[in-house]
């Protein structure tokens, strides 16, 4: 336990750890006071801006002597004061909702247990929990009996592992002469994955999207034909279920049909949208997920699971070990088909599955459906209120919407988005400013459960005033 340093530095270091022989009252007080400060920070979130007024930098080097509890708590407080504030009702900029309280508690327990999912003997119950929960999630999202997967530190890693598995399965592990197709609106992590895999930029070919931001199957068919004519194997097609700017969902069935015909792997990047398939009321939006060979899902982006929470799910989860398994001769044999460290790129990793499991248990099926339904309802309401204004919209069936003034040049849109974002921040609302289609937009992500009608009305009023300021052509808004 960290407290005032005793004269013996060795004794001080030992006192910084939990006591195995009894409950340490100073440790209890430390954790209680840290929790109280966090609860206070949450409870005053509405009084501060979603974006802190300034970024702070505490002392980073350790002091000669260890700090006492109060000094440690003050250090934590300083960092908290300069932190982004996702609990604020006006935090609408990104896919970063407030955290579930059970997920926060599980994060604390995960850190305290300090188990390692590298191998079963380092995390016996938690390794079983991960296998069971990923199997449940994979089947719940439509991948069928026998499916499963592995937790990963973010969607970027999940997407990378999916493509590595596809490459290994296709027998192209040492080939650079191949193609991966994805839509022009696919996440930047696909390009990163290709670079990490040592593939040239030409190996990734982006496919045009339609007016709704969805991958065009006709354009995909032409890309397949070009690759076939050039005798270039198509390793995989990455379909997106929830694009970053507008939340579009690619036509998975049409893409899957072409993948089957051509013998290519179908990976669905559902980091944003796949969770909607957990809800009976919204499953129709993603009823084609069962056609995927692999699927990325990030419960952190809408369900409030604390970061990071990403899963790579596969119809044939045994492919993970066949691809990444190297053997762990310094560990006892696995009690299952493979150790956790042999089922992905990560070796040592925390039991992040604990916060997903406990968070889902806290929400229950009704809570999950409530979160998803309310997010879409907020997007629909905002879009309806903005529809009377001269704006161009970029949206889909999910909870994201981006917009920009109709008829403005790219330069004018950039200036408008800068000024309007600042005015929104002054009103306690934070939107992001993505560049899409060559023009800057304002984007609202309506997954914050604290956002209510008042925030939406204020948003519309600020946007209306910003349009009027553009000149005579917008006087009638």
Image (cartoon, rainbow, N blue to C red):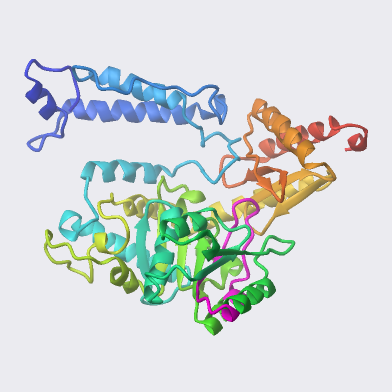
Residue at (35% x, 49% y) in the render: 355
Q: For the point 19% across and 60% down, which residue is it?
A: 120
Whether the magenta-drawn stretch holds residue 238 is answered as yes
- Residue 34 location, x and y as percent? 32, 28
Q: Is residue 139 magenta?
A: no
Q: Quadrant for residue 209, please give it.
A: bottom right
Q: Could you tell whether 436 is left or right of 180 in the image?
A: right
Residue at the image point whose x is 26% and y is 55% from the top:
347
Residue 173 picture location, percent across and down:
37, 70
Q: Position of residue 42 (x, y in %)?
A: 46, 31
- How many labels, in total? 0
Q: Quadrant of the N terminus?
A: top left
**Residue 21: horizontal and vertical position, in percent?**
7, 36
The quarter of the displayed image where residue 138 is located: bottom left
Say above or below: 321 vs 435. Answer: below
Tell me the magenta residue range. 228-255
């Amino acid at each position: 336990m960290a407290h005032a340093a005793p004269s013996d530095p060795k004794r001080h270091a030992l006192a910084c750890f939990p006591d195995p022989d009894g409950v340490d009252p100073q440790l209890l007080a430390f954790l209680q006071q840290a929790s109280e400060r966090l609860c206070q920070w949450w409870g005053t979130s509405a009084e501060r801006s979603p974006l802190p007024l300034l970024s702070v930098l505490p002392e980073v080097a350790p002091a000669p002597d260890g700090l006492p509890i109060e000094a440690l708590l003050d250090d934590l407080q300083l960092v908290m004061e300069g932190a982004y504030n996702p609990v604020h009702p006006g935090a609408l900029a990104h896919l970063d909702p407030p955290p579930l309280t059970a997920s926060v508690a599980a994060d604390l327990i995960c850190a305290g247990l300090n188990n390692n999912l590298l191998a079963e003997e380092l995390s016996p119950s938690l390794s079983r929990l991960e296998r069971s929960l990923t199997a449940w999630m994979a089947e719940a999202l439509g991948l069928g009996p026998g499916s499963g997967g592995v937790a990963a530190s973010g969607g970027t890693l999940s997407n990378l592992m999916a493509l590595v598995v596809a490459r290994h399965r296709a027998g192209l592990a040492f080939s650079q002469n191949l193609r991966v197709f994805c839509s022009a609106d696919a996440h930047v992590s696909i390009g990163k994955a290709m670079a990490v895999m040592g593939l040239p930029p030409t190996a990734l070919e982006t496919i045009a999207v339609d007016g709704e931001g969805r991958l065009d199957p006709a354009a995909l068919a032409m890309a397949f034909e070009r690759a076939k004519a050039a005798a270039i194997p198509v390793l995989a097609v990455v379909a997106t279920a929830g694009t970053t700017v507008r939340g579009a969902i690619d036509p998975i069935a049409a893409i899957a049909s072409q993948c089957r015909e051509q013998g290519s792997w179908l990976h669905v990047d559902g980091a944003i949208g796949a969770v909607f398939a957990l809800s009976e009321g919204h499953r129709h939006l993603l009823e084609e997920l069962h056609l995927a060979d692999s699927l990325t899902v990030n419960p952190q982006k809408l369900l409030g699971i604390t970061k990071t929470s990403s899963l790579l799910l596969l119809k044939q989860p045994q492919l993970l070990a066949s691809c990444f398994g190297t053997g762990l001769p310094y560990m006892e044999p696995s009690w299952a088909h493979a150790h956790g460290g042999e089922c992905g790129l990560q070796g040592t990793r925390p039991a992040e599955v604990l916060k997903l499991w406990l968070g889902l248990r806290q929400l229950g099926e009704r809570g999950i459906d409530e979160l998803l339904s309310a997010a879409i309802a907020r997007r629909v309401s905002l879009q309806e209120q903005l529809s009377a204004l001269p704006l161009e919209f970029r949206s889909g069936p999910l909870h994201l919407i981006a917009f920009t003034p109709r008829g403005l040049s790219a330069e004018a849109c950039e200036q408008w988005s800068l000024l309007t974002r600042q005015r929104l921040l002054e009103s306690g609302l934070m939107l992001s400013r993505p560049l899409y289609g060559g023009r800057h937009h304002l984007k609202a992500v309506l997954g914050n459960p604290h956002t209510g009608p008042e925030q939406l009305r204020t948003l519309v009023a600020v946007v209306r005033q910003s349009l009027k300021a553009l000149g005579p052509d917008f006087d009638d808004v």
